[in-house]
Amino acid sequence: MNRDNGITLVALVVTIIVILIIASISINSVIGDNGLITKAKEARKNWEDMQISEKEEREKLANELMNNKNNENLEDDKIEIRNYSNTTVLTNSKINMDWKTIVEVANIIATNDNITSDTSQVNLKVKGKYITLTVGDYTSLQYDGVDKKVRLIGFNHDDLANGKGKAGMTFEFITTLGTDFLDSANDIESNGWKNWELRAKMPQYLSKIEETVRNNIKPVTKKYGVGIDAASGIYSCTDSLWLLGWREVHIETECDSDFGDDGKLYRYYSVNKEVGTNTSETYARFTQYDKTNDKSLGDLPNSGDQWEHVCVWLRSVGGPHKHSHTAIEYIEGRWRANNNCYGISQFSVAPAFCIGAK
């Protein structure tokens, strides 16, 4: 019996020792340097580090995408001139830009000294799009709430009144603004464009042009003659809206009159003259464009397909008759200069204007 009890005690001691060894091993495996807790902490730290790294990578990628987007936006906002030429091939197409963009383009053209009054075409990259502007191209603007067509007739042609270079682009109305008297005094012996009644009304016409365009029209210097055949000399004045001069359009005339140096031929008209375009195509002011979709065919009752007689005022004096003025006239199926008009006559008004400056 004593021997059995001793064996049981030894077994108990051995069991306790084994349990302690196992416990020691287990505790060490859990909380030791390479234990489960340490490894769990390391795993958690690695996971957290990985999350931080992924977050930083995502933020970096987002920043790169944002920077790229900003760069794209900057690129899209740019307007740059690619090239220009003196081509004699006219497109007579619609200008697919709003007036805010046209003004921006005109300002850039005005800063380029290589683009001159002899340039007939400018190729641009405008806010990511490739655009070509050619003299003779047209667009519309709002005048007194009604669409009126205007035609691009020249680049860097007119002298800015402030003496700081050229106006970038010159447009002429090809839809008349109505009819008016030129000079009821009918005295071209002493009066010229500067003193004619119609010039004094130009601010009224200007006030009816839509604000986006009106606020960007640049005053320029215009020449004019006084006296029969401008015999009394050539003078100049400042205008924001003006009538074209005979030498600026150089339409054929049946009279041997000397209109004086009242301006230089605009590129649109010089190209047509160079290539021998007939007058009906060159000077057409309503019928040359899309009459089916165009809602701005003009104020004249006969300004559609069938014409009888149309006169559009010029600012040039006439001759050789006293008291005569000049107008562009459509009669007998063709355009010509009528230099025997009178100021008391009521003819159509289709002025010109400039936009763009350095």
Image (spheres, rainbow, N blue to C red):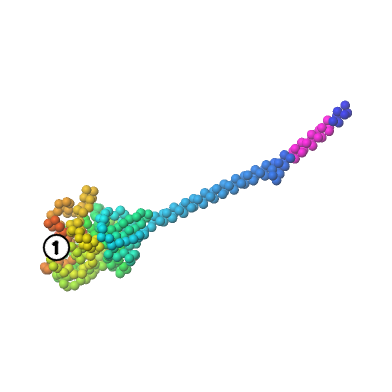
Q: Position of residue 173 (x, y in %)?
A: 23, 58
Vertical position of residue 63 compared to residue 183: above or below = above
Magenta residues (range): 8-24
Residue at 12% x, 68% y is: 320
The magenta stretch spans residue 11: yes
The picture quadrant where one finds residue 156 is: bottom left
Q: Residue at label 1?
A: 338
Q: Position of residue 343 (x, y in %)?
A: 14, 64
Vertical position of residue 163 compared to residue 106: above or below = below
| Quadrant of the snapshot with the N terminus | top right
Residue type at the position of mark 1: Asn
SS at badge 1: strand
The picture quadrant where one finds residue 198 is: bottom left
Which residue lies most toward the bottom here? 232
Q: Position of residue 322 (x, y in %)?
A: 11, 68
Residue at 33% x, 62% y is: 109
Residue at 21% x, 68% y is: 262
Determine whether, in the image, residue 331 is placed left or right of residue 65: left
Residue at 32% x, 65% y is: 114
**Dominant secondary structure, magenta:** helix
